[in-house]
Image (tube, helix red, strand yellow):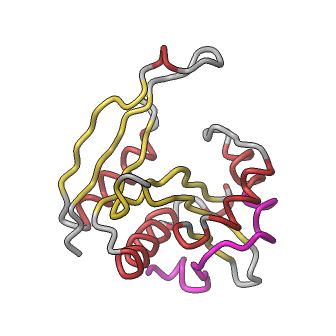
């Protein structure tokens, strides 16, 4: 943890965090924004496989949402990673991701992390490539959903990043 992260706490989200997490996602201008309802449900039903970063006042300033893949329960699928604009550039996304991976490895025997990244999202590409390196894991990439599979208009393909097995 860096000095910039020293006053921050990373823990599980609660339903009370849902509205703020929706706003952080909306304000990112990068993420596909889900309904506010979905963030409330996420905080209720997937808190064990998600993380929220809080400032010194306990207010959410970033989050990682994830779930265990039903057909591969030792795989954590990271759905979204977002950090409030005023806290970016401090390594917070990496700290949340590392903390969540450690927690889910301990509680659910997770040994693989997956996520999807649209081509050109260099921040996410760097985040997950560095995560694989820090954890001594292989990184495999393949197109999971091509652009033509999205029914709601033009959408970039989503490339699956599979990272594992995690060794540290």
Q: Residue at x 45, y 32 (%)?
A: 118
Measured as percent of width and height from the top left, residue 59 is found at 76, 75
Looking at this rendering, what residue extends furthest in the front direction? 71
User: On screen, 107 above or below 117?
Assistant: below
Estimate the x, y position of residue 105 in percent, counting from the top left.
Answer: 35, 75
Stretch of the chain drawn in magenta: 1-21
Magenta-span inclusion, residue 6: yes
**Nearest to the observer: residue 130 or residue 100:** 100
Indicate the quadrant where residue 88 lies: bottom right
- Name the spot of residue 16 as percent of width and height, x first: 81, 71
Instruction: Give the residue drawn at x 55%, y 54%.
Output: 81
Q: Residue at x 37, y 62 (%)?
A: 73
Look at the image and say whether residue 14 sits in the magenta stretch. yes
**Which quarter of the rendering shows the N terminus?**
bottom left
Nearest the eye: 115 or 132: 115
| Quarter of the C terminus within the rendering | bottom left
Residue drawn where x is 56% and y is 66% of the image: 50
* Figure disc tally: 0
């Amino acid at each position: 943890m860096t000095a910039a992260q020293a006053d921050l706490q990373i823990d599980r989200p609660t339903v009370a965090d849902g509205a703020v997490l929706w706003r952080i996602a909306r304000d990112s201008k990068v993420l596909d924004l889900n309904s506010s309802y979905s963030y409330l449900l996420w905080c209720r039903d997937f808190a064990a496989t998600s993380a929220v970063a809080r400032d010194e006042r306990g207010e959410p300033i970033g989050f990682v949402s994830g779930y265990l893949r039903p057909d591969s329960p030792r795989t954590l699928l990271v759905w979204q990673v977002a950090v409030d604009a005023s806290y970016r550039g401090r390594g917070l996304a990496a700290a949340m991701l590392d903390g969540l991976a450690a927690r889910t490895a301990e509680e659910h025997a997770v040994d693989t992390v997956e996520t999807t990244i649209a081509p050109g999202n260099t921040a996410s590409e760097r985040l997950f490539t560095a995560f694989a390196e820090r954890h001594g894991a292989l990184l495999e990439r393949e197109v999971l959903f091509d652009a033509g599979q999205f029914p709601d208009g033009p959408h970039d393909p989503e490339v699956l990043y599979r990272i594992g097995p995690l060794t540290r």
